[in-house]
Amino acid sequence: MRQLRATVDDRAPWPRPAGARLGAALCCALILVGILPGCYSFNTSLPGHIKTVMVPVFRNETLQSEIPEDLATALTNRFLRDNRLKVVQSNPDAILEGIITGYEDRVFGFNTDQQADEYVVVITVSVAFRDRVKNKELWREDTLRGVGNYIVGVSDPSQPSTNIDAQATAIQQIVDFTMSRTFEGW
């Protein structure tokens, strides 16, 4: 019976000595370190001269008197938390202006007795972000909608059960979109 014996050819690429594998790994790591920072950054789409923003209370064309103040407060708090622009009360580099153009609180669902038990709140705004230094509009959205649902009579405290809860959700959606559009350009 003949035995086959495997031999390692010295010219074969594998296995490589440990030093060569380490060198290849370091080379790959250096390439990744050079490439990855360009894939994601914290840069914004804002012009470099914009350092401050003012968020006045939006004009209100609805009968819901509390929404303009709630929206202005939510937007201001988000800019403060985000900390990329300083919020000022006068002489800003940019201004976020808007009009609350619509408010709906309508039936969204019925229970098994065919009684309305789920509602949807829709807040519609027209909003624009302007560069006051160069007197130029940076972006505008004329029909931005925030939507929130609530279920009447729900016993779970984590579920929205009033129109105030749904308004807060709708306002949060408007704030999220506004921040994305301001800093990410979409």
Image (cartoon, rainbow, N blue to C red):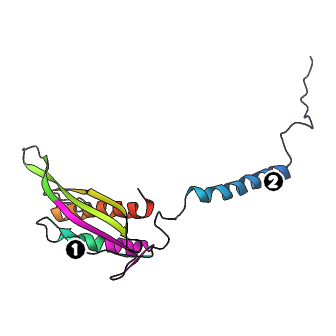
What residue did someone put label 1 on?
Answer: 69
Q: Find the residue positioned furthest to the top.
A: 1
Q: Earlier in the sequence, mark 1 or mark 2?
A: 2
Q: Residue visible at 22% across and 65% down?
A: 99
Do the CB atoms of the residues marked 1 and 2 lie less than 8 Å apart? Answer: no
- Judged left or right of residue 86, residue 76 is left
Which residue sits at x=54%, y=62%?
41
Please tell me which residue lies in front, 164 or 66.
66
The location of residue 149, given as percent across then percent down, is: 21, 55
Which residue of the protein is positioned furthest toward the bottom in this rendering?
Answer: 90
Q: Nearer the viewer, residue 4 or 75?
A: 75
Find the magenta span and give its range. 75-102
Tell me if residue 102 comes above or below residue 5 in the rendering: below
Q: Quadrant of the N terminus?
A: top right
What residue is drawn where x is 76% and y is 54%?
27
The disc placed on residue 44 is none
Callout 1: 10 Å neighbours few (<14), some, many (20+)?
some
What crowding class fits label 2: few (fewer than 14 Cα within 10 Å), some (14-19), or many (20 or more)? Answer: few
Q: Any mark on residue 23, and which?
A: 2
Where residue 110 appears, as percent x and y from the top left, is: 12, 46
Q: Residue at x 40, y 61 (%)?
A: 180
Disc 1 to disc 2, C-alpha distance? 60 Å
